[in-house]
Amino acid sequence: MNPATQSALIHGAVYGTIVCLAVLTSIAMGIWFERKFAGRMQSRIGPTYTGPVGLLQPVADVVKLLQKEDIIPRDADHALFNLAPPLAAIFSLAAAAVVPFSAKVISADLDVGVVYILGVGGLMVVPTFMAGWSSNNKFALLGGMRAIAQSVSYGVPLVLATMVPVVLAGSLSVSGIVDWQATHHWFAVWPILPGLPAFLLFYLAMLAESNRIPFDIPEAESELVAGITTEYTGAKFTLFYMAEYVHTMVGSAVAAALFFGGWDGPFAPGLHWMVLKTLLIFVSVYWVRWSLVRFRSDQLMDLCWKRLTPLGLGLVFLAAAFVQYWPGGAR
Amino acid sequence: MHSGWLSVFAFLVVSSLIGFGLLAASRVIRVRSKSDSPLKHRTYECGEEPAGLAWMQFHARYYVVAIFFVLFDVEAVFLFPWAVVLRELGSAAFVAAVLFVVVLMLGWLYALRKEALQWQ
Amino acid sequence: MGYFIDSLKAMATTFRQIFRKPATYEYPEVIRPRAERLRASFALPDDENGELACIACMACEKICPSQIIHIKSEGKRESPVTGKKRQYADTFVLDLTACIGCELCVQVCNSNAIYMVREQEVPGFEREDLVLNLERLRANAKSKTAAWAKGTVLQEMQELPKAEKKPAAEKKPAPEKKPAADATAAPPGDEKPAPEKKPVAEKKETPAPAAPADATPAAAAPAEAAPAAEAKAAAKPDAEAKPDGEAKPKEAEPAKAEGAKSDAAKEASA
Amino acid sequence: MNQVITVTATRQSAVRGSVDPHLSIRHYDPDADLMLLHFGPQHPSTHGVFRMDLHLDGEIIVKATPYVGYLHRAVEKLCEKLSFVQQTPIVDKNDYVAPMTNEQALNMAFEKLLGVEVPRRARWMRTLFAELQRIASHLLALGTFCIDLGGALGGGSTAFIHTFRERELILDLFEEVTGARFHYNTHTIGGQRHDLPAGFAAKVNAALDIIEARIPEYEAMSLGNAIFQARTKGVGVLDGQLALELGITGPILRACGIDHDLRRDAPYSAYDELVPKVIVRQGGDTYARMRVRFDETAESIALCRKAIDGMPEGPINGYKPIRQPTMAKSAGGQVYVGIETPRGELGTFVIGGGDTPTSPYRLKIRPPSLHALSAIPYIMPGATVSDAVAILGSLDPIMGEVDR
């Protein structure tokens, strides 16, 4: 093992630990905030008992869930059933590896970071369907099938939306894109025509990817009881639950990096700006979540294929045209 | 060049530690039932006796869409390298890509007219 | 596009809620104001002599639709306070776990010996914790706020004006009804409880728009009731005279607030 | 309403045109390839303990079979054993979302049987309560419907809690009058047990003002929202003729474009003086049903205002106050009384007499929800599982009164 390999491994492990723990901690706080926020939106108070103003509620949740008995249905495929939850957690965290939290804090500065993010994000459907199929439960099966239906729908708009910053910055590396924005302008701000719609497109696809309302079709608890997690208890359910939040958080971070200039911002260190932007997007996901009803899976398909896909392609070429023909756009 | 991927590998190891670590933690602290009822391990189907297994032929109604998905993802694979080097290649590359996508979108339009993108 | 705009509208609606006061209470710490008539649990009060008011007439046991009241009495015996012979409820068991809160036991109690209280029982860990026996029911009467309804109050409220009544039963409601009526509204300026005037007093409570719509029913209702009452009053003036004198000053106030509801007052004044 | 309805036993569904619900699933699926999914009784959106057996082809429902009876409590039999005056709190629990309507229907039937005249004030109070109850029930229907569409962890639950919050205002009003929030036992044979407290009119008007002001918010959260409309329009279309054959009444029938409302067509209580505007919509789909309920809420608010402002004076009871269980005796005869509850025609059929004159010989309750559920085999096929939830929610069944 040569020193370069060693240092890369250590770098990845150290920053990986930091990033993972930071993501999990901020999710714990995010869950607390979401519950308070949702409570206020619904004229309720939200959690108050656990700790000051209910701050320890997520901790209580996790401890409670971990204590639960582990029940595996008799008819289930035990191997797949047990493997799916940790896989979901790993895949949802994996995308955070290439997200630059500041100019320095990045676990792995891949030069094809965007492709990596898309690939890992697309992998999420594997544990989801694994869980749905292995539970041998009809609701879970329907959920798993819906998950695939959903992933073939939002996939293309997601790819096209991410392509817009790639075209504009001319780089596939996430930190490269952020660098370009830091020296020029944020893509959500300028060029206004492809930039902002591309962000919205990305946002919608991100909602779909992390199974958030209005696209929480695979788990649709009013229709499919709990969807893919119907048969899961205790720690395994916790992992799915966590994966969902991690996915949203990492998705928000990616959106902040790709469209809102990542760590770029005045007056404060880059890390602060990145965290602030990520949290704002994260919160907005919950704002949307507690305001809307969900689509049906065929409607999502319709929406993605008939409206968002052509829109995404159009945006990519608008961006390309901007790069090509706008005076100063190519620099 | 490869160092990034090594870091990703290390990151994945860390994240799987978290994933499996939670499972291990729960093994330690979770409750174990003293009496085991066979009902507990029955598949949930709204409290009724399940009508057969869920492992059955399932009519997934979106395979045409799935094929389209593959098609468009391949298209994206082509477009990503184009997007990175667009600046260097100039208008010719732009026009070529536009033509490529126009042809693709003609197919999309055909599918749309044939209602292949409908949930069947 | 429609999706987008409508979603923003929905989000604006939810956002507006954030600045509103929460509609919920943190229950054990904050208890919302309880309605005056709220019926939550039961109590057996003492009478004016400090004895249990219940005379074990079994009316409540008979009417209870879910048959949760069980009374046992060992017959009549002399009261240690007054020396008169009366009947006592020696055991009184009310199974709150099966109670449907219909208030019929209160409704039928002629001696106002059972009423409902506004505070719930503390939840228990066993079913027996919610079976109220005589001690707990009497303790409730001391520790908990009584609801408004009492047997005679309800009965009198429901009585038709023309139905004949026993003066003895009539005497009681008056003092009990007073705090109830006072608590919600005690408007100044006593009207004489003449039947024609009462609707006018009622109108104060229902604000201005009530006036035109009110006029016809107000005229119609007493028109039906008054002749009968008058005729009766004329027929047996002696029988009516006595309760009349007692009831009049006490009932003047509630009658005003509750309007034609207090038929006794109407009859008395007629 | 003068048209003659011919009931055909096996009527092809006019809507989906494909499935005859009376044929066995074998007819459509001889190889049993379809997935049989038990939907309920323990399911988040079956509105209680209701079960449908769905035969699914992928996600599409081929045949739906409803099963009722999980909440059977033998109310009718119980009523044959209890005396007349004891039954009001028992039937309270039938339609547990609009309990007062049960009391009203039952007591109106008894009054007709015993020949008791209800004083005018009591009739107006009954009308006021019925309309308040209608607002509360429709608000809850809208809220639970949003939960069905949007999930208990999403916008649906927000809409639900908003409507629930305003429903509480109405329950507060009932609490003011009767002392109970839900199972009131305030109607009695001949009128009401509780008179309105002082200052009640102002409280009613204040609560109605709040609800009226929030109606645009519900609109934005639910019916006015494009996603909501996409989920509901054209889903679960019920043909008006079929609805008549199935005996469906109330908002579901009115959503099919059939102008039928007992409040106007066969006035009872004070509806001869307070004539409601009947809301009718075409389409018969899920959206139309919810829209009818939504518009009826606004109409009921107006009606409540009229009722409370014009509340006449007088006695509240035309019969003896309850003093003992055996006070009411019927010599015999049979009566049927139907009233328009938030869910449709709630009928009570009583035969008096028999061995015990103090209780009915037979009592039959005709719940509107049971008839609404009978539409399921006709309107479910062709819909997806997601739609099934929406359709069921739009029928607004209350299992308490279905199973009794």
Image (tube, rainbow, N blue to C red):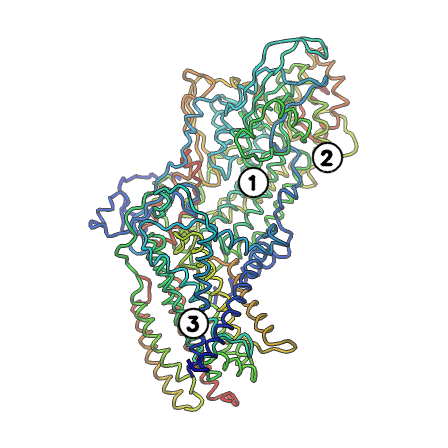
Distance of label 1 from label 2 (alpha carbons): 23 Å
Labels 3, 2: front one:
3
* Residue at which label 3 appears: A158
In this picture, residue C256 sits left or right of residue D81: right
* Residue at which label 1 appears: D132
- Residue at image point 58% right, 47% down: D165
Disc 3 marks which amino acid? Leu
Up-down: is B40 above or below D80? below
Up-down: is D116 above or below C182? above
Disc 1 marks which amino acid? Leu
Horizontal and vertical percent position of residue C53:
66, 18
Up-down: is D250 above or below A327? above
Query: Which image quarter is the N terminus of chain A in?
Result: bottom left
Check chain identity for marks 1 and 2: say if they share one.
no
- Residue C185 is marked as 2
Q: Name the image quarter holding residue D370.
A: top left
The reply to whether the C-beta atoms of the residues labelled 3 and 2 are less than 8 Å apart is: no
